[in-house]
């Protein structure tokens, strides 16, 4: 009896996300999970002793003090911007799905390893704005969560963006009252990040955003415990009715 | 930082709005509020604002700017030696807005910025405690948050020429689709391991201080568990086959490994996807997409399987028989599969596997025997011959 197997829900989600962003001109990029300090922190305008380092619970590597387990896939942005600098281009749009690591106690809503989807769009100075971030994310969440979805920005601080915002999405699960959910952070690339990647911030700028994937799926599908994702348990993978599009 | 509305009121002559309104003003124009208890706000000061918002007075100064309410006694804060030159056009180009000169200048006034206006430029010096105002982007952020991010329009990016580069991703997903079509199920496991070449300085789980050098151990373990639960997720004759795509960290350097269980046994065959030419393989491929329903939690209790075989007239309908079984099995029936069918001498034989499981407790054989007796009785009443 030959019957199809199943994809893990993380793969299914990344395909949905890649499809929506693909239609908005975003390519997909990957980078190392064992990352050097420069790409994970310093290039992102988080130099040694910067307070933002304390905000992320980093796993450090024995005998390799310049390496960390990446704390975000924002590190991949730097690699991609470096490629843009080398190619002499002035425009790039990418999303970067991948596993990231945070040294924090695990429970039903916290995992030390989880997926993040970061993204950015850069173009000639002044051509990509914070309003474009709002437009891009509004379209994404509407397509992904439903036409009722809407987003709002709140002030925040990340070393690698200025201005920086938290992104909340209004989300309604059928039969339940709608609510605001904090889904990602974002903002305009700090000029230092553009500079550190070998580009001139006078000529190039743009927005960046990123957020955890599981949290979004937990709300979308009603998954009660984040630890199910990487348990290697087939009962989780088969816990959904599945329909091929 | 905890601060009450009453304490804040001391800095203002006019009455402050309610605690709820103040909390909302902070949330959308400045900081997150962790908690409101009575009239006490627990404010989470952002790390770039610890210099000016470390004190009650600092918070009051910020609130005065947000609410556009004058302070009782205007503090002499001095001015930062850092001068930021920024134009109205630049502020609007960063934010994607159309804010007017009047609006932006009003923000500067509310924030107590020292501003010298030339024909094309504002020369801005923030109050001395505002160590975070260093570049034009910082000033744009002040304008955006004080006027309100709800005033930023949602503008879609212009179209770009050509197809975006998703070739490598498509190559990886094509590999996965190929395996799924061959009956393999994807699992995802932890990157931490007991042994490995890369050791963490600060592991979370002391028994797993290393990074995995291969997916083998996790996949073998996942397979052993999957075999245990196979009856719950797969039809009776299907073989459990698993695969994982994940990063591994041998001393030669990390790479993306694809590993699949070989003939359902050893966690055997693997491939290095970091060296495979996946861009060419994926370039023209569109990964399959699926709609998933809401998640249905699985039971933590053991399950019991029973098979039933019966003779029926050759024109009997299999789905009708399944319905009879379902209707009489009770709500403990977790899964029902037909696994055999043949015809002989004008009669048809069907065999079904039933899986019983409770979400609340361990089932007993007696309970399941009861359900099976009900099913048998119902089938016999239809003149089917249960063997």
Image (spheres, grey):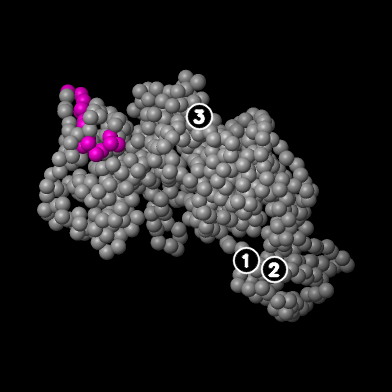
- Prevailing SS of the magenta stretch: loop
Q: With respect to residue A10, does B5 lie above or below? A: below
Tell me the quarter of the image containing the N terminus of chain A.
Answer: bottom right
Q: Residue at x 17, y 56 (%)?
A: B9
Disc 1 sits on a residue from what chain? Answer: B
Where residue B383 sits in the image (x, y, percent)?
Answer: 77, 77
> Is residue A153 in sight in this rendering?
yes
- Alpha-carbon distance for marks 2 and 1? 9 Å
Is disc 2 in contact with disc 1, using a CB cutoff of under 8 Å? yes
Disc 3 sits on a residue from what chain? Answer: A
Which residue is labeled 2 in the image?
Answer: B303
Which residue is labeled 3 in the image?
Answer: A80
Q: Residue at x 18, y 39 (%)?
A: B77
Q: Residue at x 30, y 40 (%)?
A: B152
**Helix, strand or loop under label 1:** loop
- Alpha-carbon distance for marks 3 and 2? 50 Å
Residue B128 is inside the magenta segment: yes
């Amino acid at each position: 009896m030959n019957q199809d197997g199943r994809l893990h829900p993380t793969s299914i989600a990344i395909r949905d996300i890649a499809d929506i962003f693909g239609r908005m001109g975003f390519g997909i990029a990957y980078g190392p999970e064992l990352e050097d300090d420069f790409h994970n922190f310093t290039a992102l305008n988080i130099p040694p002793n910067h307070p933002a380092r304390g905000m992320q619970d980093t796993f450090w590597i024995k005998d390799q003090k310049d390496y960390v387990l990446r704390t975000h896939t924002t590190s991949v942005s730097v690699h991609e911007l470096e490629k843009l600098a080398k190619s002499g281009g002035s425009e790039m749009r990418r999303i970067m799905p991948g596993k990231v690591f945070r040294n924090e106690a695990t429970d039903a809503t916290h995992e030390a390893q989880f997926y993040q989807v970061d993204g950015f769009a850069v173009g000639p100075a002044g051509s990509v704005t914070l309003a474009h971030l709002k437009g891009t994310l509004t379209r994404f969440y509407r397509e992904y969560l439903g036409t009722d979805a809407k987003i709002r920005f709140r002030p925040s601080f990340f070393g690698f963006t200025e201005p920086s915002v938290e992104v909340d999405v209004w989300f309604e699960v059928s039969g339940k009252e709608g609510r605001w959910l904090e889904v990602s952070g974002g903002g305009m690339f700090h000029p230092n990040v553009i500079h550190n990647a070998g580009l001139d911030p006078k000529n190039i700028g743009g927005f960046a955003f990123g957020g955890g994937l599981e949290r979004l799926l937990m709300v979308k599908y009603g998954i009660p415990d984040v630890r199910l994702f990487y348990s290697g348990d087939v009962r989780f993978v088969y816990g959904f009715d599945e329909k091929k599009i | 930082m905890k601060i009450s509305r009453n304490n804040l009121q001391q800095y203002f002559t006019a009455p402050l709005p309610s605690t709820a309104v103040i909390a909302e003003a902070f949330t959308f124009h400045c900081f997150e509020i962790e908690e409101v208890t009575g009239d006490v706000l627990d404010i989470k000061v952002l790390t770039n604002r610890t210099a000016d918002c470390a004190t009650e007075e600092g918070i009051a100064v910020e609130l005065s700017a947000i609410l556009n309410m004058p302070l009782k006694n205007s503090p002499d804060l001095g001015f930062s030696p850092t001068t930021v030159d920024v134009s109205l056009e630049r502020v609007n180009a960063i934010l994607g807005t159309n804010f007017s000169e009047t609006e932006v200048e009003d923000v500067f006034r509310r924030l107590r910025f020292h501003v010298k206006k030339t024909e094309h430029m504002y020369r801005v010096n923030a109050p001395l405690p505002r160590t975070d105002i260093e570049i034009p982007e910082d000033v744009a952020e002040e304008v955006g948050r004080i006027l309100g991010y709800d005033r930023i329009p949602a503008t879609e990016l212009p179209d770009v020429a050509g197809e975006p580069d998703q070739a490598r991703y498509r190559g990886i997903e094509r590999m996965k689709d190929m395996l799924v079509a061959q009956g393999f199920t994807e699992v995802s496991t932890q990157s931490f391991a007991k042994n490995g070449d890369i050791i963490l300085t600060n592991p979370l789980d002391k028994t797993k201080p290393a990074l995995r050098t291969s997916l083998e151990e996790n996949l073998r373990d996942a397979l052993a568990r999957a075999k245990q639960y196979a009856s719950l997720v797969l039809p009776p004759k299907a073989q459990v086959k698993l695969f994982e795509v994940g990063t591994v960290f041998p001393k030669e350097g990390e790479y993306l490994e694809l590993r699949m269980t070989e003939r359902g046994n050893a966690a055997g065959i693997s491939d290095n996807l970091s060296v495979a030419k996946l861009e060419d393989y994926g370039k023209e491929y569109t990964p399959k997409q699926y709609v998933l329903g809401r998640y249905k939690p699985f039971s933590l209790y053991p399950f019991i399987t029973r098979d039933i075989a019966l003779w029926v007239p050759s024109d009997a309908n299999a789905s009708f028989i399944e319905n009879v079984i379902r209707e009489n099995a009770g709500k403990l029936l977790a899964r029902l599969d037909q696994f055999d069918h043949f015809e002989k001498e004008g009669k048809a034989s069907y065999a079904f596997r039933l899986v019983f499981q409770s979400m609340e407790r361990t089932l007993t054989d007696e309970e399941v025997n009861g359900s099976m007796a009900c099913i048998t009785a119902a089938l016999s009443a239809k003149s089917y011959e249960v063997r």
